Amino acid sequence: MSIQTETIRRMTAPQIAGRKGGTPIVSLTSYHAHTAAIVDKYADFILVGDSLGMVMHGMDSTVGVSLDLMIMHGKAVVRGTKRALIVVDMPFGTYEESPNMAFRNAARIMKETACGAIKLEGGARMAETIRFLTERGIPVMAHIGLTPQSSHVMGGFKTQGRNEDTWPAHEADAQAVADAGAFAVVLEGMVEPLAARITQQIPIPTIGIGASADCDGQILVLEDMLGLNPWTPKFVKVYGEFGGMMERAVSAYADEVKSRAFPGDDQTYS
Ligand code: KIV
């Protein structure tokens, strides 16, 4: 008798890079093991985004997110998944100062979470760091356009590229991160024609969020598309009304407890 074991291989950064111009890349964020296990069945990669600071921890921006917080959520998502590539965001202040600092912190994320890649924000200004990391074994996903970690400089969360005069700078950012070795680039909050142009121009996949349907893939924040956030950006299509469902369930529970209709404590766990 032979025992058959099924080996499930995780997606890799080069496999994502190889999807340029092919079947669109599906991705979502996730911050916990149990939601990641569901997303894992459908997504090519899962991003443990620093948006978790705002979505899970009630922060006003992503600026306050720490490396330890990213590592804790990264570990949970890796534990809950088998097949998607897991990408963990480098939080603000952990990579901008120098390529050496970026390598030290990215290596910590990779070692402690066992994720397959990291993501960092910035275009041409981060090219040297992206090259430094990729040459030393760390796959990098870049992130340009609206970069939330720079929201204080940008004056808020504003769509980029409304003025065509700014397009060359965004195009140069995209080319610089591709030349530096990034395996994919997130285009966030960017006017549609600019995102479509960049997708045509560069050899690595573009992953759109509030950008263009012509990108090589799309990403959404899971809680946004599930209707779990009280506020979601205008471009987000809400695929489920989980906020309302949760409120109804919590209110039904509260009613049962208050009216002593709650199941008795003679129930066992299993
Ligand atoms: O932090 C995040 O969730 C992100 C996505 C919005 C791309 O960077």
Image (cartoon, rainbow, N blue to C red):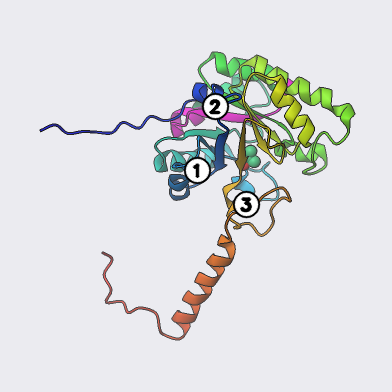
Residue shown at 83% from the left, 22% from the top: 168
Q: Quadrant of the C terminus?
A: bottom left
Spot occupied by residue 139 in the image (x, y as percentages of width and height): 54, 22
Q: Amino acid at mark 3?
A: Asp
Q: Is residue 85 left or right of residue 7?
A: right
Quarter holding residue 101: top right
Spot occupied by residue 79 in the image (x, y as percentages of width and height): 40, 41
Picture layout, residue 79 above or below residue 264: above
Numbered disc in front, either 1 or 3: 3
Residue shown at 52% from the left, 28% from the top: 117
From where the camera sits, is residue 56 visible?
A: no
Residue closest to the eye, 145 or 240:
240
Picture layout, residue 106 above or below residue 229: above
Residue shown at 54% from the left, 21% from the top: 18
Spot occupied by residue 266 in the image (x, y as percentages of width and height): 27, 77
Q: Secondary structure at mark 3?
A: helix
Residue closest to the eye, 99 or 140:
140
| Label 3 residue near ligand 1, CB within 8 Å | no
Using a 10 Å C-alpha cutoff, classify the residue at mark 2 as few (fewer than 14 neighbours), some (14 to 19) or many (20 or more): many
Q: Secondary structure at mark 1?
A: helix
Using a 10 Å C-alpha cutoff, classify the residue at mark 1 as few (fewer than 14 neighbours), some (14 to 19) or many (20 or more): many
The residue beneath circle 3 is 224
Residue 123 falls inside the magenta stretch: yes
Identify the magenta region: 108-125
Q: Marks 1/3: CA distance? A: 18 Å
Q: In the rendered structure, which disc, 1 or 3, sits on the residue that comes first in sequence?
A: 1
Q: In the rendered structure, which disc, 2 or 1, sits on the residue that comes first in sequence?
A: 1
The residue beneath circle 1 is 73
